[in-house]
Image (cartoon, helix red, strand yellow):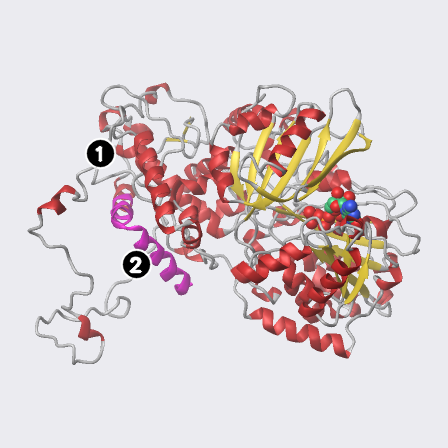
Amino acid sequence: MEPEDDEEPPLAIAINDDVVVGETPPHPSNELRASHRPDFAEAPPVGVTVITGYLGAGKSTLVNYILNGQHGKRIAVILNEFGEEIGVERAMINEGEGGALVEEWVELANGCICCTVKHSLVQALEQLVQRKERLDHILLETTGLANPAPLASVLWLDEQLESDVRLDSIITVVDAKNLRYQLKSNHDSSSFPEAYYQIAFADVVILNKVDLIASDDCGVVLEDLEKDIHNINSLANIIHSVRCQVDLSKILNRRAYDATHAAHLEALLEENSTLSTSAIHDSGVRTLCICEMKKVDIDKVKMWIEEILWDKKYGMDIYRCKGILTVVNSDQLYTLQAVREVYEIVPTRKWKEEESRINKIVFIGFAYSWWKHLKAPWIHKLTWGFGDNSLGGHVQVVWVLKFFFIVYTEMMGIKRPLEEEDFPEPSFKQPKQLDYNKKLTSNTEESHLTTLRVDSPGRAKSIFFKSQFDGRLENGDICGASLVGKEFEPSAPLSLVTSSSREEDVVSGDTSVWSSFPGFIDFGLPRRLPQQFADPYISFLNSSPRKEVPIGPDHQAGIPLWDPNASRDNNGEEELMGTCIIPMPDANDSTIDEFRVGRGRTDCGCLDVGSMRCVQQHVTEAREKLRETIGDESFEELGFSNMGDEVACKWTPEEEQVFHEVVFSNPVSHGRKFWKHLRVAFPARTKRELVSYYFNVFMLHRRAVQNRSYSLDIDSDNDEDQKDAHGDLYRNGSNSLDPDTDNDDDQQGPNGECYAVGREEEDSTVESFGDQDLDTSWVDDFWSEPEHVSHDEGSKRNHDNTAGSIFEKQDAVEIDDRTEKMSSQETNKLYADHSFDS
Ligand SMILES: Nc1nc2c(ncn2[C@@H]2O[C@H](COP(=O)(O)OP(=O)(O)OP(=O)(O)O)[C@@H](O)[C@H]2O)c(=O)[nH]1
């Protein structure tokens, strides 16, 4: 296992313009200490105002108001957005006429600031305060679904930051129109926990949108709302506002953490530390993001939005929607804003020349039924809303956790895009890789046209202390410099959407493949180019990476001897030996035979019985039946929605392609560890997601194909050739996607039917990992190359590997046998065991 803890964390943002390009920037934590910065040693700490509030309450309105205010302060803003909002937010931000100007845009697609990106937050702060001499204040706008507790703990309790940054105050913006509903729902059913905690932590509550309260009973309603707020937080100052136009002296430099407030905050933090994730996040909330390049007809969009918001036509309960639109016969950028059923579409400004005109709409709301609809044909209706009936590209549906974290400051006065030189020169050692790049690019260009995403909100894992946060995997480096210094060193093999050596290839890399990697900066900034493989053949010389498993009494669990006479009176572990815990069915019961496991389905009427499609259909039916039986809530809670092929929905086709490529390009026979490369290829994916995808989707698909393959159809020379997520053939080690005509029939059944590797699911699924952190460090040590599953006892119709790899084959059989026998429970246990080990 790599000594990750010793590594420097990836930089959040290359914000220090004093650093010469090419030089390693100084470690931020060193920079942070006043002793290392004699020039600024005396400078007072920079105040950080946390602006929080539920979805659509008016946080951005407040930020815009502050940035444009005549306060004379140089303000930096850190913005953590939820879902795929970056494009939307960025376009919507008023860059300030005479007010603050945006200097830098950075996205960290790592999760909710309150859950998973605290580490990145600290780094961003560290780097901001390095320029403290030009900075008076920092605003930190959270997502509408953030719990302020972890932020408060980072800003207030963190000793490292103490000297340079101080928590000035927590401002919570609430929506006067919707607050009642949110608090009542929280009271009745624990929905909207975020709204509750945001008020609980506030120093100031801005009771915004009072203009939306009917004027007749406005006074009474506001008084009641104030009572509600004070019931949650008696210390909060409440300010009424319309469009957050408040006296800024009541917002900035409050120095709220005097003795009284500090005690209050401390008590809250203490209380919060014991809360479970589900207590602080509404687990039903999802994000759906739709992108479309074509210009839209604004009337159709309005009709479509009204159907969604007002008629709830697609079963969605939308809490929040925002978007940018490019409209026919107009060069104006239109913004769409909706909070519950109130919406507006207004022209905001002219599209800039360098901007790519796009429609991008983000919906956030209660989610269960969305998924059903996403699979259903309403997608077509939905895109029909955009001008014409054709999709113009294929629709991707993915479930991903993605949040964006943007830092911009007013110091420079103009945007400073990253320099071309900030990005590493790629090395190109394998000409074949170039073909693959081209293929990937062309495959994905069309899919760039229409993108449909469903995002899931983050779940808090380590609530309080940043030391608990493992930023390595989840915390991708957005500027690339630090990754290049570590995982992307020239010799490090990396297989993903690799770059080519030519300039035009760099340009052609601007596809949705790139956009599926959150670790780059979108909107016109140069793409970070990952490095190529080292010589793939070199590791042929290495021995098998398989680890030795020690045996003997020192390493194995003790199993007591069977004693038929053991009585329950005995204490100790023997007492249950021989005692039937789960009653077994009566062997003489004839009805049991009917349902005997292993006989296959008796009720299947599919024409393509036994095909992967057939299996998938039955699994889906069983899943739906189970959902009906146990109810949606239990279904979600037990993790069934994160199990099996459902997991694939959280991945874009491009990501899946890269996943396959990475795994197959790092085969056991080459002594490679694909987990390591997966982590590099997917810096924003958690270990849990990687492992989950591997076991729930990748492995089951492979097994499905293998189970249906005939040994005679397989060219033994190409034993390691694999098909990727979309059925394209490529060869391990060579990274070639060149189809091998010898293997054209690899996936044909006895009657010549074709088995495409697609969205199928085998009869078994692997259980989800629940809400706990999955420590997959064992993956590095133990499960080095489980993908090498080439022999299948069960199907007797498998690859017949002949010459040249006997040693590998033995390994594979062992691994295969073990996975074959693993039930989902056992698999989970295996994860758990190894998490504990490591
Ligand atoms: N009528 C009315 N609308 C307001 C007021 N304040 C903000 N809005 C509108 O409410 C919508 C949401 O405002 P934002 O500032 O984007 O809300 P937010 O809290 O940043 O939203 P998220 O980023 O989704 O969390 C926008 O359409 C605003 O124009 C107000 O006082 N009255």
Q: Nearer the viewer, residue 46 or 815?
A: 46
Q: Residue at x 76, y 79 (%)?
A: 259
Q: Main secondary structure of the magenta part?
A: helix
The span shown in magenta is 812-838
For badge 1, the amino acid type reads: Asp
Is 816 a magenta residue?
yes
For badge 2, the amino acid type reads: Val
- Asked whether mark 1 lies closer than 8 Å to ligand 1, one says no
Q: Residue at x 70, y 48 (%)?
A: 56
Q: Is residue 673 visible?
A: no
Q: Badge 2: how crowded within 10 Å, few (<14), some, or many (20+)?
A: few
The answer to whether residue 320 is above or below residue 361 is below
Relative horizontal placement of residue 364, taking residue 95 as reference (left or right): left
Dot label at residue 549: 2
Dot label at residue 799: none
| Quarter of the view holding residue 555 | bottom left
Work out how far the residue at label 1 is from the one at label 2, CA to CA, in angstroms: 44 Å
Label 2 sits on a secondary structure element that is loop
The answer to whether residue 609 is above or below residue 64 is above
Residue extending farthest to the front is 216
Would you name the residue on which mark 1 appears?
603
Q: Nearer the viewer, residue 497 or 602?
A: 602
Q: Nearer the viewer, residue 713 or 312?
A: 312
| Quarter of the view holding residue 287 | top right
Relative horizontal placement of residue 682, taking residue 159 as reference (left or right): left
